[in-house]
């Protein structure tokens, strides 16, 4: 159980910090003056971006794949017991797989805001 405690102490805060800026709250850089509609359009586009949930099928699949691969790696580690290695590997793998998908989702949300703002006529450059 010491291994699992270390895993959660090191990895979970990183995942939480990585999702602190959810991508949906992205404020794009606009070339030129801001129109009167900018504020209301930005809010609408940010709300649209939240439709891409972090608990999506990609995140679930990657967590499951990561858990399976991590469990196999944990079994191969001779420095820990079989059950503890299996569990620790599965936890690390699941966190790594889901964490990577969550970062990808954050970028997808950011792109939704950019595309939406461009679609509403704003000269978004990034």
Image (cartoon, rainbow, N blue to C red):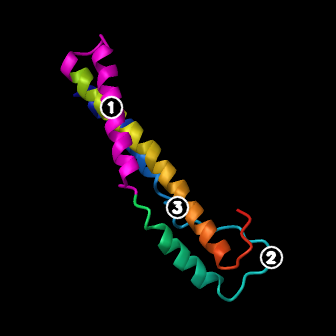
User: Which quarter of the figure is the N terminus placed in?
Assistant: top left
CA distance separating discs 2 and 1: 49 Å
Tell whether 18 sits left or right of 60. Answer: right
Which of marks 3 and 1 precedes in the sequence?
1
Q: Residue drawn 30% across and 12% down? A: 79
Mark 3 lies on residue = 109
Q: Give above or below for 70 relative to 8.
A: above
Q: Nearer the viewer, mark 2 or mark 1?
A: 2
**Is residue 111 at all visible to an observer of this figure?**
yes
Mark 1 lies on residue = 6
Residue 16: % across, % down: 41, 50
Q: Residue most toward the bottom?
A: 36
Mark 2 lies on residue = 32
Q: Give above or below for 16 relative to 92.
A: below
Q: Are marks 2 and 3 in contact (CB under 8 Å)?
A: no
Q: Residue drawn 46% across and 43% down? A: 100
CA neighbours of label 3 inside 10 A, class few (<14), some (14 to 19), many (20+): many
Q: Give the range drawn in magenta.
A: 54-83
Q: Residue drawn 65% across and 75% down? A: 119
Residue 94: % across, % down: 34, 37
CA distance separating discs 2 and 3: 24 Å
The residue tagged with tag 3: helix, strand or loop?
helix
Q: Nearer the viewer, mark 2 or mark 3?
A: 3
Which of marks 3 and 2 precedes in the sequence?
2
């Amino acid at each position: 159980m010491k291994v699992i405690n270390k895993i959660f102490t090191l990895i979970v805060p990183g995942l939480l910090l990585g999702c602190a800026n959810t991508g949906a709250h992205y404020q794009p850089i606009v070339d030129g003056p801001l129109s009167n509609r900018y504020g209301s359009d930005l809010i609408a586009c940010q709300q649209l971006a939240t439709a891409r949930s972090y608990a999506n099928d990609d995140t679930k699949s990657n967590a499951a794949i990561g858990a399976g691969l991590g469990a196999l790696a944990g079994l191969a580690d001779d420095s820990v017991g079989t059950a503890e290695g299996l569990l620790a590997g599965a936890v690390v793998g699941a966190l790594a797989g889901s964490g990577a998908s969550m970062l990808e989702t954050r970028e997808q949300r950011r792109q939704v805001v950019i595309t939406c703002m461009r679609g509403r006529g704003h000269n978004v450059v990034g």
